[in-house]
Amino acid sequence: MTDKSLSRTAKIAASSGSLGLWLRAPVPTSPFHARMQQLWLQWRRLRSNASALFGLCVVVVMLLAALLAPILATHDIYEQNLAARLLAPSFQHWLGTDELGRDVYSRLLFGARITLYIALLTTVIVAPIGLIVGTTAGYLGGWVDTVLMRIVDVFLAFPNLILALAFVAALGPGIQNAIIAISLASWPPIARLARAETLTIRKSDYIAAMRLQGASSARIIFGHIVPMCIPSVVVRVTLNMAAIILTAAGLGFLGLGAQPPSPEWGTMLSSGREFVMTSWWIAAIPGTAILLTSLAFNLLGDGLRDILDPRHG
Amino acid sequence: MKPTRPLIEAVGLSISFGPKHARTRVVDDVSFRINEGEAYGLIGESGCGKSTILRALSGLNGDYDGALTLADKELPKTRSKDFFRRVQMVFQDPYGSLHPRKIVEKVLAEPLAIHGIDRASERITETLDAVGLGPSFRYRYPHELSGGQRQRVAIARALITDPEILLLDEPTSALDVSVQAEILNLLRRLRIERNLTYLMVSHDLAVIAHICERAGMMYKGKIIEELTSHQIRQSQAGQDYTREFLQATIEAVARRDEAVA
């Protein structure tokens, strides 16, 4: 440790007072205390990783924007004003107006809601399914493994976007169907990952020790193997979010995701396509938002890998 | 010597690995009996099948021929929950035998939850005390502990359900010498205090001589000879191989005994 970081530690100790002392106490006094000390260490490691911190900041800003959209927005996002169409960015309209005279800045804020809604809901569906399928296949092995992994192979055989397209085409366009379609396409890689992790974990002595305690397979899988797989799955899912956002935007762009009046970024991008030569902001602004968000999730995922993966500890 | 009955018995135990056309017999027709309260050792060079016997007995590997009995009852290939309460195992590598994301308390609470044993909190305190770890270790993660401390936690985990039999798979070979002595003395003390029966596997004669009253010398999957700890110390062996093995390590035994005592 350098002098600088030492003095910084001292400063933190002084400023955070008893909480800081509690977090750095040499002997944890309760399970909660021990957990919090671990989190504190991980947070300190994340803080020293500049790009991950940048990713985290962008994601937090996104979340705040989505949460506070009604307060931050300056115009009604559905109100059309043909007299004020295709206006360049100005004090009146910070990011200009689109071809129907709607305020792009306000629509961007509400679009963040839709984008995050799709990304988070997909993740919530995909991560548990992938985790359960992967760990069960990996731990039980034998025919269970064979059957589950062949199912995974079937899903992996289709390109992501094509599978989503086919599904949305069959069920009809809309955000819910887009979410289901994207989920269908993105759980298999997570199952693969969880299975690979499980194969290395199942042979370890601590799993053998649990078997010798008389633990059931379910207890071992959910109590001992899943916690070991969660870090890599979290990393994978965070990196996946970028792909999910892009797929959602792609579906929106093709007219199969969110439908026109809704301010989904891909849909905005697609409607701005005709005016790229004359009014660049209509397409460029949602495009930049998609780019920044995917980048932020990628950077955050990389950073999380560094702090969560025990092999990098 | 007090009157004893055989607690564990192996009759004609054979274990093979590999596909049908190329099976390798790793353990070949091994028989031994361990009396209640006795410490029995299996010695031999690497790959002679001693750990394989332990894994078969513990129930980790059900693919064996011959019979293993516990208190005169033959054990089924798939062990019952009751068996796991009575027989516990301590692994060789303390760095691999503890779950990296569980605090000590959780590691010890789990067996109690599986077997539905009450007074969990007090039992954990008692067991930690018994293995020489104070309450300050209770909420630690394994990566915050040294090798010796981890092995103590592993021993505590094995002891928490009050088993009668402890299977020890080279419990000290991954530790450095001074810590080895501590762990060996701990194991010796625990056996007396809790009236445990030990089956210990080691390639280290000094360790076996220190802990066990009797030991089987293994060579190429067979027990070629049984020795008492006295015979090991005096290097009185019937077989040429045993004599060679003893001779090779005799100096180490003498040296280590001084250190441990």
Image: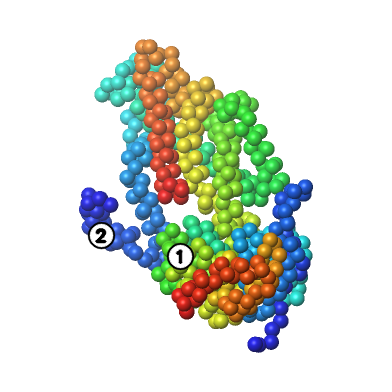
Nearest the eye: A86 or A207: A207
Residue B162 percent location from the top left of the image = 59, 75
Which residue of the protein is positioned furthest toward the bottom in this rendering?
Answer: B2
Q: As shown in the figure, which amino acid type bears the numbered disc 1?
A: Asp
Q: Which mark is residue B91?
A: none
Can you say whether A124 is above or below B67 in the image? above
Which residue is painted at 52% across and 79% down in the image? B189
Can you say whether B245 is above or below B185 in the image? above
Determine crowd level at label 2: few under 14, some 14-19, many 20+ residues with C-alpha closer than 10 A. few
| Left or right side of A141 for B248 | left
Disc 2: host chain = A
| Left or right side of A65 for A159 | right
Residue A161 percent location from the top left of the image = 56, 27
Nearest the eye: B90 or A294: B90
Which residue is painted at 43% across and 21% down in the image? A269
| Left or right side of A70 for A168 | right
Nearest to viewer (mark 2 / mark 1): 1
Secondary structure of the residue carrying tag 1 is: loop
Determine crowd level at label 1: few under 14, some 14-19, many 20+ residues with C-alpha closer than 10 A. few
Can you say whether B244 is above or below B16 in the image? below
Q: CA distance from mark 2 to mark 1?
A: 41 Å
Which residue of the protein is positioned furthest toward the top in this rendering?
Answer: A277
Q: Is residue B168 visible?
A: no
The residue indicated by pointer 2 is A17
Can you say whether A58 is above or below B77 in the image? above
Q: As shown in the figure, which amino acid type bears the numbered disc 2?
A: Gly
Secondary structure of the residue carrying tag 2 is: helix
The residue indicated by pointer 1 is B176
Disc 1: host chain = B
